[in-house]
Amino acid sequence: MKVKSIIWLVQYSQALLIFSFLFIGSALVSRSGDGAILVLEFCIGAGGLILFFFRSIVVTRAINKSAYPGVAYSVMEKLGLTQRLDLSLSDGLLNEIFKPAYPTTEFLTNNGLKTHFFTEGIEFREDGFVTKEKTIPWKAIYDWTYQAGGRGTQTSIIISYYGANQDIYNLKIPAVGSNGIDLLLLLTHFKGKYGQQQQA
């Protein structure tokens, strides 16, 4: 299972529960004359309920079998999704987050990610996080926060980093649609991969 699919399953599990109840309710209320459709509605609804109630087991197994378990865990943590699951950080998982051994090209290809976001004017490169104004070295970035949007506010990612004088700065990047998860995946990988190299 792809990292984005694992995150999607956890992120939208509440919607899945509602959808499942609607399907079962529809089957009970309509009492479809066609028995096959009635059975299909019950099966889809029941499948959704099973997936919701056993999502912790499904997601834990998917993360463990994923080629990038550390990235999946880290992004879910940034999205505030790990408290819904019974997941714990092992030494192996921590090493995978902070010292990824896999090549960047493989990670980008397998997860359908691009490194250049023209609308936002940002780029992910080995030497750092590039904006229209500056390049922030990976070793200078120490954290990032996902800020969900609401009425009148846009979803964004706030990157915290040290300047040349060791002052702390924050950079706010707008996140539109699914590119919020893409940005979190890229930040996790590039910081883990190249932040260590720059500090060596």
Image: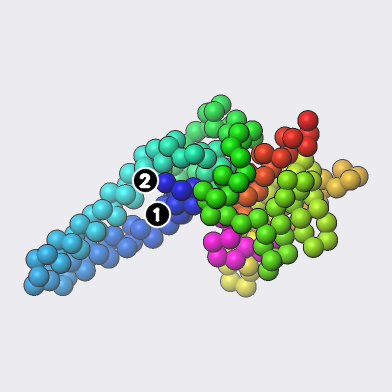
Q: Mark 2 highlights which residue?
A: 55
Secondary element type, mark 2: helix
* Residue 90 locus on image (x, y percent): 53, 28
Residue 59 in view (yes/no): yes
Q: Position of residue 130 (x, y in %)?
A: 76, 55
Tag 1 residue: 13
Tell me: residue 33, above or below residue 71: below
Query: What SS does tag 1 mark?
Result: helix
- Farthest residue in the right direction? 165
The residue stretch that appears in magenta? 172-182
The answer to whether mark 2 and mark 1 are in CB contact below 8 A is: yes
Q: State the image coordinates of residue 157 (x, y, percent, origin top left).
A: 66, 57
In the picture provided, is 69 more to the left or to the right than 46? right
Q: Nearer the viewer, residue 12 or 5?
A: 5
Residue 60 is situated, as x and y percent measured from the top left of the image, at: 42, 38
* Residue density around tag 2, few if under 14, some if 14–19, many if 20 or more, within 10 Å: some
